[in-house]
Amino acid sequence: MNEGVEWAMHSCVNLSWAAGEAVTAKRLAAFYNLPTAYLNKQLQALTRAGILTSVSGPKGGFQLARDPRNISLLDIVVAIDGPDDAFRCTEILKEGPGADARADYTKICVISQAMRGAELTYRRELASRSIADIADEVVRRTPAAPDDTRNRFANLKS
Amino acid sequence: MNEGVEWAMHSCVNLSWAAGEAVTAKRLAAFYNLPTAYLNKQLQALTRAGILTSVSGPKGGFQLARDPRNISLLDIVVAIDGPDDAFRCTEILKEGPGADARADYTKICVISQAMRGAELTYRRELASRSIADIADEVVRRTPAAPDDTRNRFANLKS
DNA sequence: GTATTCAGGACATTTAGTATCCAGGTTATG
DNA sequence: CATAACCTGGATACTAAATGTCCTGAATAC
């Protein structure tokens, strides 16, 4: 899995605490000492996916496009890593005995179904966790986190 | 995910129908028109993992090392693809504010925990499905499959 | 108008996946 | 014993994907 998924999730949690004002890619990158230009690519992907909104120019930057309760971890994984399953069925049964050339073995192969079923439980789990859930749990453990985050953004003004 | 996982799973199902006699890598590869030398590498990995046993020399080949009811899809994924999770936590929180340099953020980071939890459900699902389950379901849908498989192995004698 | 910032294409670099080949060891068979 | 079939594992090559940088162009606050 793309490392950008981790960056994107942490950035979205931080953005949930910067509600109201846009944060530049430069400051989001400086927060965790990440390469600015590359993080910017991930932020662009989140924007294309409708998870973030972006504003150009001075005072510009990124912010969450909707309520963090309505942004799931799965949304972020799909935006950064793409919609494909980890297990890719190449329909090798088509090369086996008694194969039907017109059949779609990605659908009817028992192994393919089992793997897809497992990935479905994985995705269902990720879909059930929102950025707000994560942020709330962080606050429960570390109440100062939102203030710390806002302060750090402010101090990374450059 | 490594494409060899798909090859290995289909090969194990086929081997469950060849019970008693070893099948060579060449015939296992010819079954689905796969590159012999590369499939052989995956079979070696399955052997190292204790899923297959191998015999050298004429009449040699591979067979299941244990009852197919006791070989899970997860066993095969781990043998071929390795034990690592898809999501790899790089502990970027160590670069953030208020970080504890001695803390293990792969354990305590809320995002890392959520991702790990989702992968756990995935693995649990794969662990609950055995090669025998898969083979039984194939037989239920296509009763001739075991005979077809044995015949094909016999005809690929070369 | 100028400085700041996002958008996105064009590279360059590194790493992982996909193969191929060969030399060496094992074993059935005549 | 000689031979051929077969697995083992290292070396190597090729390809694709992930990672990272750079630059031009467009939008916007001041």
Image: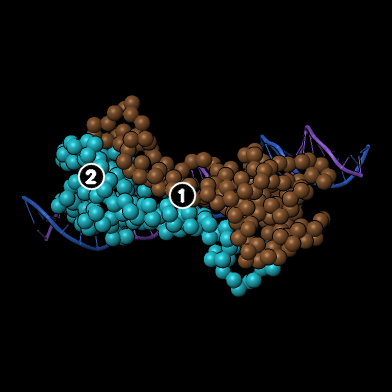
Chain colours: A brown, B cyan, C blue, D purple
| In this picture, residue C28 sits left or right of residue A26 | left
The three-letter amino acid code for the residue at tag 1 is: Tyr
Q: Which mark is residue A62?
A: none
| In this picture, residue A47 sits left or right of residue B109 | right
Q: Which residue in the protein does label 1 denote?
A: A122
Residue A116 quadrant = top left
Q: CA distance from mark 1 to mark 2?
A: 25 Å
Q: Nearer the viewer, residue A37 or D16?
A: A37
Residue A131 lies, in percent from the top left, at: 61, 52
Q: Nearer the viewer, residue A132 or D23?
A: A132
Question: What residue do we see at 43% from left, 54% from top?
Answer: B121
Q: Which mark is residue B136?
A: 2
Question: What residue do we see at 55% from left, 51% from top?
Answer: A129
Question: What residue do we see at 80% from left, 58% from top?
Answer: A154
Residue B6 quadrant = top left
| Label 1 chain ID | A
Residue C18 lies, in percent from the top left, at: 41, 44
